[in-house]
Amino acid sequence: MSAVRTVAIAVAAGVAVAGLGVWPGDLPVFWAVTLGVPAAAVAAVGARFSGALEPQWAPLPEQADSASEPQAANLATRLAEAADDPVRFRARLRPRLRRLAAATLRAEHGVSGLDDPRAVDLLGADLHALLTDPAAVLPGPERLERMLAGLEEL
């Protein structure tokens, strides 16, 4: 979960507890705020570590009759999500890009996969590292556009 969402959830929880303490609970504002701060802290910790509860979307299965299917709308959504959260890049976007690159290499150049030495030459070192390096992060939009244009030109 992004930091903005975490803060928003924490503030909402703290305000809700303090508001319930003041209005129906008839507590003094000081005590209501004193109760709201720990509630906000617990909500922040819970929201920050709730990433495991988000669905992990598996990449679509490869179709035997299609060499590559970019699915532009899905990729655009994944790019927007991955810009905020690197875990989403590794879990959602990278598998789709890997599958797209592997299908393009196989169909256009007969390369068996991304681990083939010829794949580095065809894709370029930057794109190959983005797809294969476990520590790779999503580059900026302009650089990613250049990388994907190179993949498209294969």
Image (cartoon, rainbow, N blue to C red):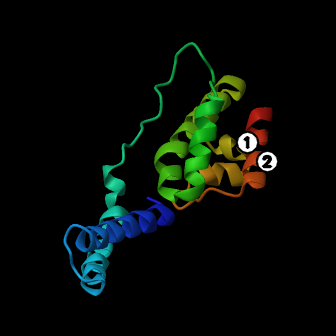
For the residue marked with disc 2, what is the amino acid?
A: Arg
Task: Specify whether 143 is left or right of 9.
Answer: right
Dot 1: element: helix
Q: Residue 32 lies in what quarter of the image?
A: bottom left
The C terminus: image quadrant:
top right
Q: Residue at x 52, y 57 (%)?
A: 85
The N terminus: image quadrant:
bottom left
- Front-most of 58 and 38? 38
| Outermost left residue | 25
Q: On the image, numbered disc 1 is attached to which residue?
A: 148
Residue 77 drawn at (x, y percent): 59, 40
Task: Specify whether 83 is left or right of 4.
Answer: right
Q: Which mark is residue 146?
A: 2
- Seen in the picture, residue 6 relative to 154 is either above or below; the reply is below
Q: Residue 72 lies in what quarter of the image?
A: top right
Determine if residue 45 is in view. Answer: no
Q: Residue at x 62, y 53 (%)?
A: 130
Q: Marks 2 and 1: in contact by CB < 8 Å?
A: yes
Q: Which mark is residue 99?
A: none
Near mark 2 (Cα within 10 A), the count class, few <14, some 14-19 or many ≥20, is few
Q: Residue at x 36, y 43 (%)?
A: 55
Residue 110 drawn at (x, y percent): 66, 26
Q: Count of labels shown? A: 2
